Amino acid sequence: MASSRPNSAAPSKRSAKDATSQNEANVKVILRCRPMNAEEQSENERSVVNTRDALREVSITQTVKGDKQVDRTYSFDQVFGAHAAQEDIYDDAVRPIVEEVLEGFNCTIFAYGQTGTGKTHTMEGYHDWDDASSDSFADSMPSNAGVIPRAMSHIFAHLKAKGVEHSVKCTFLELYNEEITDLLAVSDLVEGTVEAANAKAPKHPLMEDGKGGVAVKGLEEVTVANPEEIFDHIRRGSAKRRTAETLMNKQSSRSHSVFSVTVHTKESTPDGEDVIRCGKLNLVDLAGSENISRSGAVDKRAREAGEINKSLLTLGRVIAALVSGGGHVPYRDSKLTRLLRDALGGKSKTCIIATVSPAAHSAEETLQTLEYAHRAKSIKNKPEINQRVTKNALLKDLQKEIERLTADLTATREKNGVYLSQQSYDEQEKERVDLKARADELRSALDLAKSELASLAALFEDQKKAHKALQREHATHAEKVCIAEREARVATAELSKEQRARLEQAHLADEFEAAQERLRVKTDSLGDALASAKDEMRSLFGKIERHSDVDATNASVIESVRLDVVARLERLETSLAEVKTAEEGARKATRRAIDDVKKARSAEADELRDQLRRTRADA
């Protein structure tokens, strides 16, 4: 990690409990989903993540092929939903790891996820306790304190309860654009900006420690005696970290940070010999992966995002290589993966806290985080408890180191070594400075080219995704056009059928009108014939009256017949008038019904024409 692994020479005595553990242990992965923020709530953003804490499962809803929704479920060692408290996360997931540090293991905890998902909140939270004393530390712990402050409080509380002689040392570094800065180094902020101070701060190279790990050259290691001191260093270091506001996060970390604590405790063996136990805890806050087109990063921020994405991409390749067991693991492709080498596939116990957003607009990034985290579960480390060194062995190692330094000092005093003339030294020094300047220029150009390449790669991926989205949209529109064409053909057929029906109805109406006219003519003819018959009957009865003297004997009978015939004729005339009136009313009602049918069919035909025009317009 940030410095050499806390190992020393082999002890002269070792118990069975101190023997190196050969058991493999999988990386522990914890999933935390943050709640919806105020902006997402105001925009009524849809939640696509569902956590089931008791089952240790999380599912994400994906929309595929138009409106089809598919749920993908992942299982982790522990799952914490939006309402999980900081204390619950620490007690359930992190406290056992800190206990193992105090047992003598090297442990690493790091947060991984998209920018704005709560990594820094989970790792640091709130840790401003200027008025707290070490005795009241647990009582004054704020509810939103993160992993780092709770772990430090836990360590000191444990050491105080044990009452053993101990020492605690810490380091705090920042990895920004592939350059390591010591956040605990003394520096001035007189210029008013963190970036100005960090620009002047010396950069620390990585080097192999000869024990399979890496060390940061020149990194300041500070001894702390109580929680107040360590939190003062955390505050000073956090103030120097580079942050910036983006569209996705108002205080986005622009660098990775590693805060390391090394705990040494002195114990006595049954033989009365003093031994030293050593454990180390590395707390890593990774910068979040960032979509440049969505975060609005430009110029310098775009370069920062490119470097962050590049290092996280390398981390993903390392995880993939460790899971697949494909041989070469590209640790050396990034300083981040070199720093995490012991945590991923090494001798450290590791816990990854993956943080995600529940919002639908971050579904793609959330799915990537879930895939990475689920894959990391399969990484196997080989944690080993650090050797407990006896006091005599430690003194012997220190004595050897003193003898070596004394020999170097004696050789310098006696000039028993390699010396150069001033001219040769000046020439070599000038050449070294020129070469260093040239190397720095080339390194800067290479970094810029890599950043541009990462930006172009990200832009290419965005364009590729946009192209695929356009292809899907085109296919959707083509399908809609085909459906519209089919609907247009159906509507055209319906319209033709309706037109034929209207023609048939018009023909039937004309035929009915002609039949009504013929019936009226016949009715008028019958009326005329009836009137003529009535006149003839009157004439007949007149004749009968004139011949009454002839038919005197039958007068009464004839009169009776006459009256009966007249009455019948009058009833027949009345019935004929009523029939004629009813016929005229029926003819008018039929004409009105035909007109209503014509209007209804015309309106339906107009509606079908409008629907056909809209369908063709949509297509």
Image (cartoon, rainbow, N blue to C red):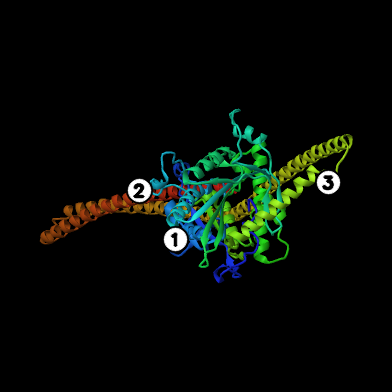
Q: Label 2, label 3: how many angstroms apart (C-alpha)?
A: 137 Å
Residue 360 in the image: x percent, y percent? 52, 50
Callout 2 amino acid? Lys
User: Is 613 left or right of 402, judged from the image as shown?
Assistant: left
Q: Label 1, label 2: how many angstroms apart (C-alpha)?
A: 80 Å
Task: List the residue tagged with mark 3.
Answer: 416
Q: Is residue 233 visible?
A: yes
Label number found at residue 53: 1
Other residues around mark 1 within 10 Å, as few (<14) / some (14–19) / many (≥20): some
Residue 429 in the image: x percent, y percent? 83, 37
Callout 3 amino acid? Asn
Callout 1 amino acid? Asp
Task: List the residue tagged with mark 2.
Answer: 588
Above or below, 555 relative to 592: below
Nearest the viewer among 7 and 450 is 7
Nearest the viewer among 165 and 343 is 165
User: Is 550 left or right of 381, judged from the image as shown?
Assistant: left
Residue 464 in the image: x percent, y percent? 68, 50
